[in-house]
Image (cartoon, rainbow, N blue to C red):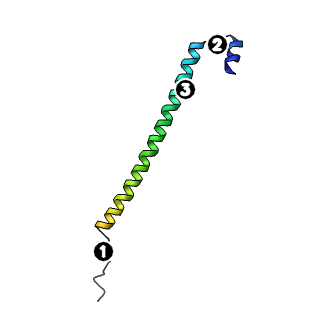
């Protein structure tokens, strides 16, 4: 569609349009890759936080609080 419009206006340059289209696709692809990488990193961080918290709870359970002022 755009090719016909640009050709009718006399401003169509095949090389320029191919380079621009390739630039846009590369830019979109890089953006997509960055978004996916950030999502993966966030998932790994959240998994690591959960695993670390579970291990800490196993290794160092919270002791029952005993108030020294209350007689047993």
Mark 1 or mark 3, which has the lower sequence index?
A: 3
- For the N terminus, the quadrant is top right
Element marked by disc 1:
loop
Callout 1 touching callout 2 (CB < 8 Å): no
Q: Which of marks 1 and 2 is in front?
A: 2
Q: Name the residue under label 2.
A: 12
Left or right of residue 24: residue 38: left
Residue 61 percent coordinates (x, y):
31, 70
Residue 62 percent coordinates (x, y):
32, 71
* Residue depicted at x 43% and y 48%: 42
Residue at the top extreme of this rendering: 10
Q: Tell me the number on the disc at residue 13.
A: none
Element marked by disc 2:
loop
* Residue depicted at x 50% and y 36%: 32
- Circle 1 packing at 10 Å, graded few (<14), some (14-19), many (20+), is few
* Residue depicted at x 68% and y 15%: 6
Q: Name the residue under label 1.
A: 63
Residue 53 percent coordinates (x, y):
35, 61
- For the C terminus, the quadrant is bottom left
Element marked by disc 3:
helix
Mark 1 or mark 2, which has the lower sequence index?
A: 2
Mark 2 or mark 3, which has the lower sequence index?
A: 2
Q: Mark 3 points at which residue?
A: 24
* Residue depicted at x 34% and y 58%: 52
Q: Which of marks 1 and 3 is in front?
A: 3
- Circle 2 packing at 10 Å, graded few (<14), some (14-19), many (20+), is some
Which quadrant holds residue 59? bottom left
């Amino acid at each position: 569609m755009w090719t016909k419009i640009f050709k009718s206006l006399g401003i169509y340059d095949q090389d320029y349009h191919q380079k621009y289209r390739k630039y846009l696709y590369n830019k979109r692809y890089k953006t997509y890759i960055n978004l996916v990488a950030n999502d993966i990193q966030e998932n790994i961080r959240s998994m690591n936080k959960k695993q670390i918290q579970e291990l800490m709870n196993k290794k160092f359970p919270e002791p029952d609080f005993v108030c020294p002022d209350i007689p047993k």
